[in-house]
DNA sequence: GCGCCGAGCTAATACGTATTAGCATTGATG
DNA sequence: CATCAATGCTAATACGTATTAGCTCGGCGC
């Protein structure tokens, strides 16, 4: 750690091989256009010196001079710590990593992005976006203004999860929540449920809107289909409200809320799904211990990660035509919390 | 994606503020040495323009010109896919991420490193090591030759897990396997075990050697302390051998082997720990489904990740004095697979 | 002998920043 | 008034690569 021995450069290689730096660069990049010609002997000589010295081009200089880097940035909107949402995001990262490897790209995690007002910011004084050729955006809620800016700057990116337009179409790989929820509603209707309730988290994220849209679209033939907000720590009250309302099945946006609801029901001497059916709408976003196998669906997180790399590389090299927006199907989970409504119960 | 609008540079800022590019750089870097002075009004003017344009310095150019990048490389030796070892490495990454965030560093995952002869290589034609200021090395076995080369090149790095010298001391943050195993041996001896067996995986990785060393050091007062290799798929044979040998407790290097051993014992009508005690030596490196709470220890993986960032930053800025080698204590796990040897059994 | 052409290479420059030597100006001092 | 120091800034250069215009040299046609 005294004085770092100046690393080998193309100039050094050039000197050793008795050629110019330009020639070394040309050989390295296998330039065999009509424009540029290198004699086979010269090429071999240069390659031999490169092999001997173990030289590898400085990626920084390379990036500065040319255009691409084969580096994919990953920006995670939720502050990583101490939030438990890491577990939720992990599968996305696995998928991203798998395809990054396949495409020969390195991954740059923007862990240094500062948190302002409880959320991370892409754009800040020292953002390093341009180190990467493009960027994958992860997060439940993504700031619309930042999407606008990305679009304006023409910076290649892709969001994981559907996003509304932001000064132009937003490239994304999302999960088809609307269809998944609609399918579950249809199952419930088929099993005889007539009074449905949707329990939301009170956010306006696209992922929530899509779920609600699916619910509304499919619940049209129900006798009653309402929506209410889940209030933290008020599971008991919620259960009372639901029963008083004659609800037989509740669609719960947030997994943790579903767990709390089930506990509350059991505490009140009710059975699930005997007295009340509970359907969850996606994997837990925070770790919740439970033994219950909830009926619901699984978000294809790994596959979303993989495809986001695919889409991004298309956007980067410009080979992608038109807006790159993909919605992947969710896998329904049978579980055992969706039953048949008890006909003996007063249905009003 | 037509023609990317040339991004704003310091020259642009300079022109707008009516100063030179050098001044912009000086203002940006808050250079207020005795050597360099900028009038407050000038500084403000420049800062205002920067704020207006939303300019952020190009990290690539910055890195080329100066020395550091605030980027930490992460190299994972095991090929990521389709191996299940991701789960084993995840906690390390969590720790690394946590401290990278704390230190204001981004993380560069070298997912593009090619696999040669079943293992990944750091040094290859297109390695991007120099994008990062330094690098964290993860992996059960790390190639000694590559460590040599890192040392020779004076490239800052730190290994997660103890490593033997490689042309100089290797900076590492490891787990103190020797002590952990020794403690477990002592517990077994205290409970009356006299004939111990160590079941190894047949690798020569430092992590294995440390465990064996701990075993040998602590088992000196045992009546018999042997070592044997676990052969995949031969759990039944192994159990027979152990019993024939009069072994009452077996220390198993590999978690999956321990699981197989317990099954085999049960299949033979034996009880664990009644007839045979089983001690595991660290967390599973591949996912193994089991309900058994094995006695053993836990590797402080997150903490190792955190401290590896600490050590690396020390190595990078040269503030670290002497070889940076840390061994962290493992947490013993009580479990219920280590019992008291049955005195009724013929001890020979 | 001259012009031309193609092959094989190099010189020069750009990329965007950090750094350093030094210039111009001002005010103070003898 | 000459000298000097302090202040505020700029010109020039380095970092290591990619790219392109153009140079040299030999051979060939006429």
Image (spheres, coloured by chain):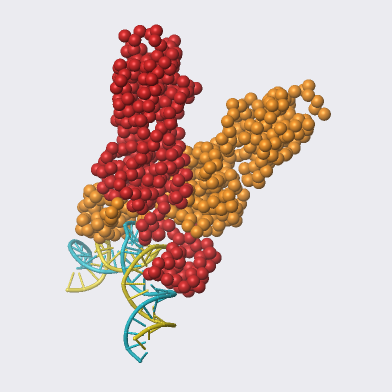
Chain colours: A orange, B red, C yellow, D cyan
Q: At 59% from the left edge and 55% from the top edge, which residue is drawn?
A: A145
Q: At 26% from the left edge and 58% from the top edge, which residue is drawn?
A: A11
Q: Is residue A222 above or below residue C30?
A: above
Q: List x then y, in percent, for residue B29.
A: 44, 63
Q: List x then y, in percent, for residue D28.
A: 20, 62
Depth order, front residue of B35/B111: B35
Q: At 37% from the left edge and 44% from the top edge, which residue is drawn?
A: B136
Q: Is residue B72 above or below residue A179?
A: below
Depth order, front residue of D23/B185: B185
Which of the 4 quarters of the picture holds residue B60? bottom left
Determine whether, in the image, residue B157 is placed left or right of residue A291: left
Depth order, front residue of A212/A229: A229
Depth order, front residue of D16/B300: B300
Which of the 4 quarters of the picture holds residue B9? bottom left
Q: Is residue D3 above or below residue A37?
A: below
Q: Quadrant of the C terminus of chain B?
A: top left
Residue B114 seen by the camera: no
Determine whether, in the image, residue A180 is placed left or right of residue A347: left
Residue B298 seen by the camera: yes
Q: List x then y, in percent, for residue B327.
A: 36, 37
Determine whether, in the image, residue A8 is placed left or right of residue B35: left
Q: At 21% from the left edge and 56% from the top edge, which residue is drawn?
A: A16
Label total for image: 0
Residue lying furthest right: A348
Q: List x then y, in percent, for residue B158.
A: 35, 44
């Amino acid at each position: 750690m005294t004085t770092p021995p100046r690393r080998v450069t193309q100039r050094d290689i050039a000197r050793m091989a008795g050629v110019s730096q330009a020639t070394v660069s040309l050989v390295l990049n296998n330039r065999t256009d009509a424009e540029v010609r290198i004699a086979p002997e010269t090429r071999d000589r240069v390659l031999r010196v490169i092999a001997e010295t173990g030289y590898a081009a400085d990626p920084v200089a390379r990036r500065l001079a040319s255009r691409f880097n084969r580096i994919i940035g990953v920006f995670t909107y939720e502050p990583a710590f101490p939030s438990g949402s890491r577990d939720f995001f992990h599968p996305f990262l696995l998928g991203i990593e798998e395809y990054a490897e396949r495409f020969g790209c390195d991954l740059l995690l923007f862990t240094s992005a500062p948190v302002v007002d409880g959320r991370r910011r892409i754009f800040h004084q020292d953002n390093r976006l341009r180190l990467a050729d493009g960027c994958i955006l992860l997060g439940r809620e993504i700031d619309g203004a930042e999407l606008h800016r990305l679009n304006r700057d023409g910076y290649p990116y892709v969001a994981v999860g559907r996003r509304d337009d932001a000064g132009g179409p937003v490239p994304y790989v999302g999960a088809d929540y609307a269809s998944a929820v609609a399918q579950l509603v249809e199952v419930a209707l088929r099993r005889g449920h007539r009074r449905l309730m949707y329990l939301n988290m009170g956010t306006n994220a696209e992922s929530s809107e899509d779920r609600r849209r699916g619910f509304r679209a499919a619940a049209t033939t129900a006798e009653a289909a309402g929506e209410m907000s889940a209030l933290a720590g008020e599971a008991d009250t919620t259960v009372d409200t639901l029963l008083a309302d004659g609800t037989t099945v509740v669609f719960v946006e947030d997994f943790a809320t579903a767990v709390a609801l089930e506990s509350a029901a059991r505490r009140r001497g009710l059975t699930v799904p005997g007295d009340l059916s509970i359907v969850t709408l996606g994997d837990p976003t925070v770790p919740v211990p439970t033994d219950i196998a909830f009926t619901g669906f699984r978000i294809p997180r790994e596959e979303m990660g993989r495809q986001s790399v695919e889409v991004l590389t298309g956007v980067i090299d410009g080979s992608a035509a038109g807006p790159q927006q993909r919605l992947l199907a969710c896998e329904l989970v049978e579980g055992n919390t969706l039953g048949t409504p008890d006909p003996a119960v007063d249905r009003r």
